Image (cartoon, helix red, strand yellow):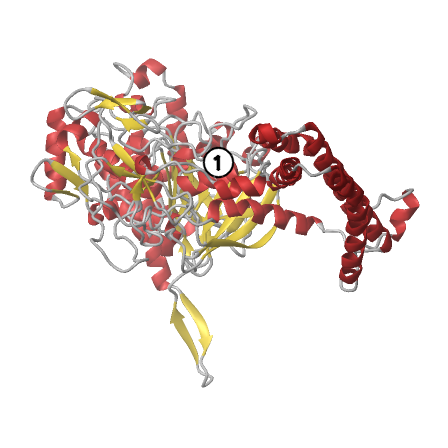
Amino acid sequence: MKTENRPVPLPNGGPPGAPQQGRARQASRDLDGKLLLPSGAVSFSWHHAGPNGQTVKARRQPVPVNDSGEVTHVEWECPECPDSGQWFSAKSKIERPLCGICGVRLHKTSDRRISIPWGRLYRDHTGSVNSAAATSLVGMAGVAADVADLSLAGEVAQFAAIPAIVAGSWWMTRAWLRRQAETDEELTRDTIARRARGAGYLAAAAGLWIELTDVIGFADHAAVALTALFGLGVVGSRPYRRWLADRRAQALRPPVPLDDEDDLYDDTPQPSEEDLLREYVLARWEKVSAKGRVLHGTSLENIQASVGGWSAIIVAHDDSDLDPEKFDMPEPVRKIARAYSVGTSMVSIIADPLDANRAMILVQRTSPLSTGSRWNGDGIDLTTGTAETMTLEDGNRGRHPFWRPGWGALMELIAGCTGSGKSEYVNLLLALERKSGRVVSWVGDPQMGQSLGDVRDGVDWFAPTNEEILVMLRTAVTVMLARNLLITRMRVTETRPDGTVVQRRVKYVEVSPDFPLLSITIDEAHLPMNDPDVGKEIVKLLALLAKSGRKANVKVRLLVQSPLLSELKDSVLRAQLASGVVTVFRTADRLTGPAAWPGGKMPGDPSALPAEWEDGTTAAGVGYNSATARMRMRSDYAGDLWDVMTRGDTVSLETAVLGAAGPLYADRWKRLEAFDNMDPAEILGAGIPSNLLDSAPGDTTPPAGGREAVLRFFADRWLDGDRDPVQFGDLAAAVRSVIKTRACTNAVNKLAGEQILDTDGRGGYWLTESGAEQIGVLDEVMA
């Protein structure tokens, strides 16, 4: 697929430092300075297609090209901001864009001139240059003496002056250092004597070198001699300078204790583990928070050790270029993982629900989710209606709510692809319901309960077919209405402030043995809801129970692979379920999670959750739960449930509603026994039920509907932050493996008519904000 990224309009001018409008450009290099391939390009190449069809070779670096060999992007950089390289479209009409950080005009990387850093070279080799210069000066003095051609008396006087020069150098050096010692305590008597002797030695060597130059006669070849002396000074000074550096390093090195007893008297304060951790974390955070980096303008607070790593609070300041809503986007997570040398799965960023400028970060080499936990056998806390069912990423335990005291039943939606762990989690929830003694559990499974195991025999009603599920839901609605009538007839005695005793009506009855919670669980719910014969009525009954069952202590729990409308069929039903408790395990695509999550903004991408860990063990049960902190969790492993599901009495409906439930409820086990005794050939009839094929194990392909395929395409682009129009030809090519071009045309026209998509009239289409809100991805990426 070839997608054209149109450049965002930039301001034509403005004062320096004025920020540019539009979304951020693509960085051209990573933290190590390596070129990053921009979106729209297929590779880097040293050769590209020129304007007249000829092949052109790049001058300084390879350039990004498309399938046709044409240059797609040009790298620009800011002369003021370090590491500020950005990709701009090669088709952009802007002559010189502005830097989004300091407002300075950018220039192309290819126009940058190569300059020699003379100043830095001199600073790095100051010692060698000074040694060579001193040697050359001595040689120049010798050449001058040779040129002077003094008489014998002059030569003798010149030679006799050497001792005086040596003595003068020694005396003057000692006198100058003694004066400096008045303010410098490091200049001891031994140090002054040693340096004075060194000055005398150098003076003697210089004098003898001058005389040797005069005797040999270097005047005839002065240029050659001085050049040779310069090189000799560089090479000859290296052993001396190395020895001098070793002496200085040894003087600065702390003394080594003579024995272990000396350590007892070392009162030097040692940094604590907390201080060392803080120093390590902050030093590496500078790599991602420096100016021009993805997390520029952020800092860390409350750094502390966590399970398997460390945790902190990210704070975005006013000068941050990062939208706080993008803390947990792939790019920041990738940069943080590189800075701390960990995998991206080991980095978790959890946004603060009360402050958009703060987020919690967890970096863990060993996650508490990697091993998981077994259910400890504890049941539901009857005072709160919750139970411990999971381990959170920070090592704390998470609780799953079944009902809310004083409020009623909580609806539930559990989503996840095959093998993600949702069936095992449901087994745990059903075991908790049975053990509580307060819950009547009804279960419908069109796959005939194979994944439930012993749980099937421990529930009050099990429906193995779509037809039996319909009967069960009809009975549930009847029970709900009967409870509503009974509640309206109830009275409670109350004494008013004036002492009058009155009988007041009741609005809600708490969950108790006399008024248990009726929990209806439908596994693979999309199968009965899409049944051609009974599906429509099943959807209506589920929507009615989800909307009106709360006050009658009736809850609905649906298990689906994808909570999109193509499977749930009813927006009211999906909204009611999402307002309760949502659990999302690993999904097959990025759209499933936001469509199910309350508000659309998930703590992370469920399609990126691992199927297994690095050591090959399964990661089933890893997901997100809306009733806990905004971080990953792993559900407990239920284990062997035989004792829980077979011992003790199964909670059934209260006596007051048995008449309303009628014979359909009374004969439920007879029908199940008859079903179990039927010949498989009689159950299957002419062949395999077609709806079972839709959820074959391992099948994670999206629905073949044109509308669904187009929405998934635009949802993925929206989640990636790409809002540019897409030409219909590119769209049709992208979804061609799923739907035909005609189906794509019909879907686009209908979506445009519903204002989910918009068009420029020239074949370009894009997802509108209202459309993003309808499919549940509006808050996933902020503009």
Q: Amino acid under label 1? A: Thr
Q: Is residue 756 left or right of residue 318?
A: left
Q: Residue 370 location, x and y as percent?
A: 57, 34
Image position of 14 with respect to 117: above or below: below
Q: For the point 27% across and 60% down, which residue is it?
A: 15
Q: For the point 48% across and 49% down, which residue is it?
A: 628
In the foreground, 328 or 379: 328
In the foreground, 408 or 209: 209
Q: Residue 750 location, x and y as percent?
A: 11, 38
Asked if residue 218 can be seen in this view, the reply is: yes
Asked if residue 631 can be seen in this view, the reply is: no
| Mark 1 Cα shell of 10 Å, populated few (<14), some (14-19), many (≥20) | some
In the foreground, 556 or 106: 106
Q: Which residue is mark 1?
A: 344
Q: Residue 121 location, x and y as percent?
A: 53, 39
In the foreground, 669 or 35: 35
Label 1 sits on a secondary structure element that is helix
Q: Residue 333 location, x and y as percent?
A: 45, 41
Q: For the point 58% across and 40% down, which residue is it?
A: 124
Q: Count the marks.
A: 1
